Amino acid sequence: MGIRYLSLTFAACVLFLTVASTTAAGPQLEVRLPDTGPGRLADGWLKVCRTHDAVKIKAWTLAHLSVETAKHAPVDAIAQQEAETCSLNGGYRVAEIKRSEDQAVEWSMVGLKTSIWYQMKFDADASGKIMNAGIWPIMPAESALPKDLSDSALATQVKSIVAQRAKLGLFSGIVSVARGTQVIASASGGYANREKKTPITGSTQFALGSMGKMFTAAAVGQLVDQGKMTLDDNVGKFFPDYPNQSVRDKVTMRMLLSHTAGMGDFLRKATPAMVKEGIKRASEIMPLFDKDEPLFEPGTKWDYSNAGLALVGAIVEKASGEDYPDYLRKHIFAVAGMTNSDPNNIPHTSSLLATPYTKMTEKGRSLDWHATEPGMGLVGTPAGGALSTADDLIRFADALRNGKLVSKAVFAEMTKPWRTSEHYGLAMEIEDVFDRPVVGHGGGFPGVSTHLYLLLDSPYTVVVLANQDSPYAVMELANQDPRSDVLAGWPALALTVEKAKAESKRNP
């Protein structure tokens, strides 16, 4: 969740056009770019963008890139991708100048046809040529949100956003907004199965990707509440013979859940049998990483780690005496009333299951959508991969925040940053949206793009589930996960946060 600042080469960044949008409250005047070298570069880019002409965009790009950057930039790909996205948006309106310096400019802008919000930057060298550029999705400006945020108005907005994204081919999935367990807005677009044209509903099962890490954290929270472990227990308490001594002696449950243990990944190490047949217990995954040395001194840095969460699942098995999949079924899904959710540790098909679609292949991107090939990311483990529905996830969020799954004290620990000013807690992303705290987790894999948002200090939840990745080719260049949940999810989240803020002012 949230906005991640990108600092990449022009080649990667200009292509990174995962987007978010909302309907503006009314006509907005265009802001003038500064009369500086970088400002004039930005103005030139916006003008050539409005031509939607790949040949002109390529010529402009070649003329304005620094010599060093031009050596590494796939200009043909940049020009084609920019032409497509510029055409999609009909050009852009500058909304705000975020930063202006002698050799840099940064601004927010909105698609003229789509109301899609971006932030963009140019860094120039001493000769005035572009040496670095970036474009990334942002929340719509708070001032651009509509004033009417009644339940009915919010429902209309969400339906409009999802319909537009689906029509443009940018989103296939569902967005639901709930107050407690009451759904107040829900809209879907695309199909769960494109061949059969199966509609997507609140009961459609989606592969969740890493969103499932929250289930693992909730399991740990329950065992902490029961006195069977503490967050500061080390790995050695549960696995005294764990092969790597540094992990065994220094790594704690808190570090594993907060990605500060220095552990790496295991997905690419999975055996063909695991991918095909799945796993029965979390401990089966441990040999894939249990001899690995930490990447850094445990507890000193943050680095996303699927292996760390897999180890947490094995520890849950040790502390509870139950296999991880069975633990989820009995103590998470059953308790929260998640009747259509499944650990998915043994991959299977179901009439409720949405097919994941992607354009990613081993040789790069294809022109057409196809069903995602089997992979460890589609096998349920403590690091993610479970199946759930929009309706079930609303129940999960409500049970989590209201003490049904874990105590209020444990939930507070889960939603506390691992270090001041950081944006991650215990398997929980933490963001500030319009000065309101929002927590949750997302998941991404080819054909899988999901997010669950819980607005703290309010009863509101936003669920976004998509069964396709972003159609933009940039993902492989920028080394970013394909994510399409932000296309419809961020504007819905922005509207919901603004609604919660307005209601808290009326009822302090």
Image (spheres, grey):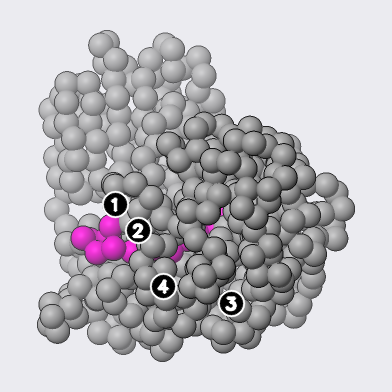
Q: Which residue is mark 4?
A: 462
For the C terminus, give its image quadrant. bottom left
Cα distance in 3D space between marks 3 and 1: 42 Å
Q: Which mark sits nearer the N-terminus, 4 or 2?
A: 2
* In-front residue for pair 195/452: 452
* Real-space Cα separation, disc 4 to disc 3, in angstroms: 20 Å
- Left or right? Give the position of 427 relative to 22: right
Residue 164: which disc?
Answer: none
Can you identify the residue that label 3 sits on? 332
- The residue indicated by pointer 1 is 110
In the image: residue 52, left or right of residue 28: right
The magenta segment: 432-444
Of the numbered discs 3 and 2, the one sitting upstream in the chain is 3
Q: Horizontally, is 108 left or right of 464 in the view?
A: left
Magenta stretch, main secondary structure class? strand
- Looking at the rendered structure, the kind of residue marked 4 is Val
Q: Are marks 1 and 2 in contact (CB under 8 Å)?
A: no
**Which callout, 1 or 4, points at the residue further toward the start of the chain?**
1
User: What is the number of the mark on residue 416?
Assistant: 2
Q: Nearer the viewer, mark 1 or mark 2?
A: 2
Above or below, 460 against 116 in this view is: below
